[in-house]
C-alpha cells in the first residue's frame, strides 16, 4: 500500500512501536504515543533521561511499526483461519528537540491528538512540566509503507 495509507495507519494507531538500537547493539522496541505534524515528522515525549534517550544519542536511526483493524477471521472463500489487518512501517531519524518553541508545538500536537477536550489546561500543564520533559522529533528518511488484508465491501480501502 502507498504512503498515504501507511500514514493513515500510523495516525489511527493508539500506539506506534518505535525500535531503537542500544549502545551495545541490541534492539530496543517500545510502544509510544506519537503525533504527526506533516507527512514526514512525528513527535513523542518522555523523561529527560533513560533508555530511549541513551539509544538516540548512540544511534538516531529508528524504525516505526503500527497495526490497526486487527481481527481474526475465517476466510470467506476457502474457510482458512486468517487475520484481517492494516499495518504500516517507516524508517526515520530521531533527534532530541532543544528549542522551547518546538517543544511546545510538539506537546500541543500530542495533546490535541490524545486529549483534545482538555486543551484549556494545556498552557498551565506545559509551564509546570516543560523543564523536565524531553521531546523527540522523528523525521522519516523514506516514505512509509503499508500492508493490509481485508475482506468484504471495504476490501479496496
Image (spheres, rainbow, N blue to C red):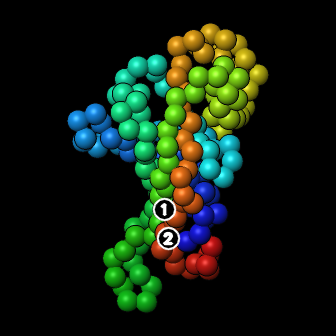
Contact, mark 1 vs mark 2 (Cβ under 8 Å)? yes
Mark 1, other Cα within 10 Å: few <14 / some 14–19 / many ≥20: many
Name above or below for residue 117 compared with residue 145: above
Is residue 72 placed above or below 63 in the rendered structure? below
Q: How many marks?
A: 2
Q: Compared to 96, does 49 lie above or below?
A: above
Can the viewer see residue 55 in this picture?
no
Q: Which mark is residue 100?
A: none
Residue 140 seen? yes
The extreme bottom residue here reads 77
Nearer to me, 19 or 22: 22
At horizontal 40% and vertical 30% (from top left) the residue drawn is 57
Distance (Cα) linking label 1 and label 2? 6 Å
Which of the image's four quarters has the C terminus? bottom right
Q: Residue at x 43, y 50 (%)?
A: 63
- When asked about the image quadrant of residue 82, the answer is bottom left
Residue hosting label 1 = 87
Report the side of 52 relative to 2 (left or right): left
Q: Quadrant of residue 62?
A: top left
Q: Residue at x 51, y 75 (%)?
A: 150
Q: Quadrant of the N terminus?
A: bottom right
Q: Which residue is mark 2?
A: 148
From the top left corner, tell me how far across and down residue 129 is, in percent: 58, 13
Please name whichever residue, 42 or 61, is drawn nearer the observer in this view of the structure: 61
Measured as percent of width and height from the top left, residue 139 is found at 57, 45
The x, y position of residue 112, in whole percent, is 69, 35
Q: In this rendering, is residue 81 above or below 136? A: below
Relative to 21, 9 lies left or right = right
Amino acid at each position: 500500500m502507498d504512503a498515504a495509507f501507511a500514514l493513515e495507519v500510523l495516525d489511527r494507531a493508539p500506539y506506534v512501536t518505535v525500535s531503537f538500537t542500544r549502545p551495545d547493539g541490541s534492539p530496543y522496541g517500545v510502544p509510544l504515543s506519537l503525533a504527526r505534524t506533516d507527512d514526514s515528522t512525528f513527535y513523542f515525549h518522555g523523561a529527560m533521561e533513560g533508555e530511549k534517550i541513551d539509544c538516540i544519542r548512540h544511534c538516531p536511526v529508528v524504525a516505526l511499526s503500527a497495526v490497526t483493524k486487527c481481527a481474526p477471521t475465517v476466510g470467506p472463500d476457502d474457510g482458512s483461519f486468517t487475520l484481517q489487518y492494516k499495518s504500516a512501517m517507516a524508517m526515520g531519524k530521531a533527534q532530541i528537540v532543544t528549542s522551547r518553541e518546538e517543544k511546545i508545538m510538539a506537546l500541543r500536537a500530542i495533546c490535541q491528538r490524545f486529549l483534545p477536550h482538555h486543551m484549556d489546561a494545556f498552557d498551565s500543564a506545559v509551564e509546570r512540566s516543560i523543564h523536565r520533559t524531553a521531546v523527540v522529533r522523528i523525521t522519516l528518511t523514506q516514505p512509509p509503507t503499508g500492508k493490509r488484508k481485508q475482506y468484504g465491501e471495504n476490501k479496496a480501502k
